[in-house]
Amino acid sequence: MLTKAPRGTKDITPKDAYKWNYVEDKFREVCALFGYEEIRTPIFEHTELFQRGVGETTDVVQKEMYTFEDKGKRSITLKPEGTAGAVRAFIENKMYADTQPTKL
C-alpha cells in the first residue's frame, strides 16, 4: 500500500522531530566528553564488504540484507549494520595515520 510507511518504520514529523534532535544533541555531547567523533558512511555499500566482514553464513548476510544490482551491474546492499562501513571508511580515508586510538 503506497499510502502507508513500510511495516516496522515510522515517519518523524515536524511535531516530533525536536525530540529526536534533543536526544541526538545529548548523545553528541556525551560522546564528545569521551573523545568520540562522528562518522557518516553511505547508506549502501558493496555487497562483498558484508559477506567478507561478517561471513556469508551469518544471519545478517542470509536474512537481514537488502541487495540489488546497480546500473553498473555491481551488487550493492543497504547497510544492515555500521561496523563494516566504518572500517572500510577508516581504511579508505587512511584514518590509521591519524593519532590513535580513533574513536568513532
Image (cartoon, rainbow, N blue to C red):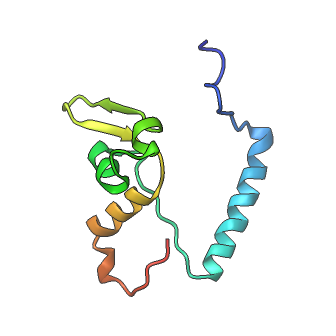
Split into 4 quadrants, where in the image is the N terminus? top right
Q: Is residue 7 left or right of 15 when viewed as pictured?
A: left
Q: Residue furthest front?
A: 57
Foreground residue among 57 and 82: 57
Residue at x-position 70% and y-position 38%: 12
Q: Is residue 48 left or right of 29 when viewed as pictured?
A: left
Foreground residue among 88 and 37: 88
Q: Position of residue 57 (x, y in %)?
A: 36, 45
Q: Is residue 17 left or right of 31 when viewed as pictured?
A: right
Foreground residue among 28 and 48: 48
Q: Is residue 79 visible?
A: no
Q: How many numbered dots are placed on residues in this image?
A: 0
Compared with residue 6, is residue 29 higher up or lower down, i.e. above or below? below
Give the quadrant of residue 90.
Answer: bottom left
Q: Is residue 17 left or right of 48 when viewed as pictured?
A: right
Residue at x-position 32% and y-position 61%: 88
Q: Residue furthest top?
A: 1
Q: Position of residue 10 (x, y in %)?
A: 68, 33
Q: Position of residue 59 (x, y in %)?
A: 46, 43
Residue at x-position 30% and y-position 43%: 47
Q: Residue furthest left?
A: 72
Give the quadrant of residue 100.
Answer: bottom left
Give the quadrant of residue 54.
Answer: bottom left
Q: Is residue 85 visible?
A: yes
Q: Position of residue 5 (x, y in %)?
A: 64, 24
Compared with residue 102, is residue 46 higher up or lower down, i.e. above or below? above
Compared with residue 84, is residue 64 higher up or lower down, i.e. above or below? above
Residue at x-position 27% and y-position 31%: 70
Q: Residue furthest bottom?
A: 99
